[in-house]
Amino acid sequence: MEEPKDHIEEHIKIWQKASTSEFEPDVEQALQKVHHRIDAKEKMDIKKKTQPQKLYMLIGSAAAVVLLLISIIGIQYREATQEGFTGTLLALETGIGETLEYELPDGSRVSLNHSSSLRYPEAFNSDTREVYLEGEAFFDIAPDAEKPFIIHANHTQTKVVGTSFGVRAIKETDEVVVTVSTGIVNLSAEGKSGHIELTKGEQGICLPKEKVLEKNANPDPNLLAWKTKILVFKQTPLAEVAKVIESTYQTHVSVDGSIASLQLTSTFEKRSLEEVMQIIGMSLQVQVETGDKGILLTP
């Protein structure tokens, strides 16, 4: 704005003439280009890294001289060492309320839930494809029978060849939960021989400290709701419903104690938060109040 007025007017004319209705930037492709362009020497040591690094890129529109600034948040490129691995690791990280989808070097895709991190090598050059997870993620693994995919998470290993599944390894919960969507997954505890085999629809639980492995007889149908946006409730108390919604949509939901025990039976498939709350309000005859601190359900 400090430029001469005629310069500003010229920029405005260019902007107004530019047609952006048919231009949709391919963020994933741009991100992959950044991934390949960053030189290893420019990566920062993980011990020196104290603040999340934001990468900014400009994508040009062929139709006009318009530059779109795309801010990619939660991607960090840095050198790291991990127990059992020495070399350069790249890191994906998400903050509170953020999720991230990314394609790994082998073509596998990972969806990272909020407050989570994933470390992986620049290339899978060994006999296995190994990554390190803290938090929660959903994996869609590219098949490769000669290179099993192994996820290290809170002293557990999840081993697959080609399948899709979710892993929840939040330290505060002292357990690792694996939910299989397709294929077969082997879940084991590090330092313990043997594993449990999980197939489509099954859920495995590991208590790392006790090295206990077991299949969940009553799998939580909403454990992957943050990814699928499919919520299933069967005579579920409203207080528990609120927790699931809060986790799925990253919005605080509180319930008045007098209605906390009301039960809801319903399935929501890819509904917006507003639609879900409206349906709950009408079904259970409760008041839905939205404010700066989140959502409050009252009689």
Image (spheres, rainbow, N blue to C red):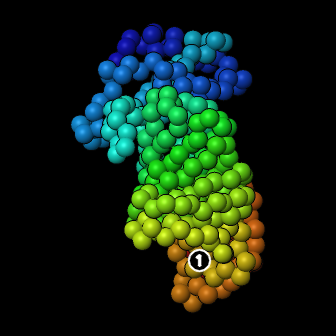
Q: Which sits in the foreground, 10 or 238?
A: 238
- Residue 246 placement, left or right of 40: right
The residue beneath circle 1 is 240
The quadrant of the image that shows the C terminus is bottom right
**Could you tell me if residue 224 is visible in this image?**
no
In the rendered image, residue 257, in percent from the top left (x then y), is placed at 53, 87
* Residue that protrudes farthest toward the left in the picture: 48
The picture places residue 292, in percent across and down from the top left corner, at 47, 63
Relative to residue 222, is residue 149 depicted above or below? above
Q: Position of residue 232 (x, y in %)?
A: 71, 69
Residue 111, quarter of the rendered image? top right
How many numbered marks have been drawn onto this rendered protein structure? 1
In this view, 32 is above or below 260: above
Question: Residue drawn 49% across and 31% down?
Answer: 126
Return the x and y of residue 14 as percentages of the image width and height.
58, 13
From the viewer's perspective, tell me whether residue 104 is left or right of residue 37.
right
Q: Residue visible at 58% across and 85% down? A: 260
Q: Where, quadrant-wise, is the N terminus in this rendering?
A: top left
Q: Is residue 48 left or right of residue 88?
A: left
**From this viewpoint, is residue 21 visible?**
yes
Q: Residue furthest bottom?
A: 258
Displayed quadrant of residue 106: top right
Q: Residue furthest front?
A: 193
> Looking at this view, is 249 or 125 the one in front?
125
Amino acid under disc 1 = Glu
Q: Residue at x 25, y 39 (%)?
A: 47
Residue at the location (66% across, 12% down)? 63
Crowding around mark 1 (Cα neighbors within 10 Å: few <14, some 14 to 19, many 20+) is some
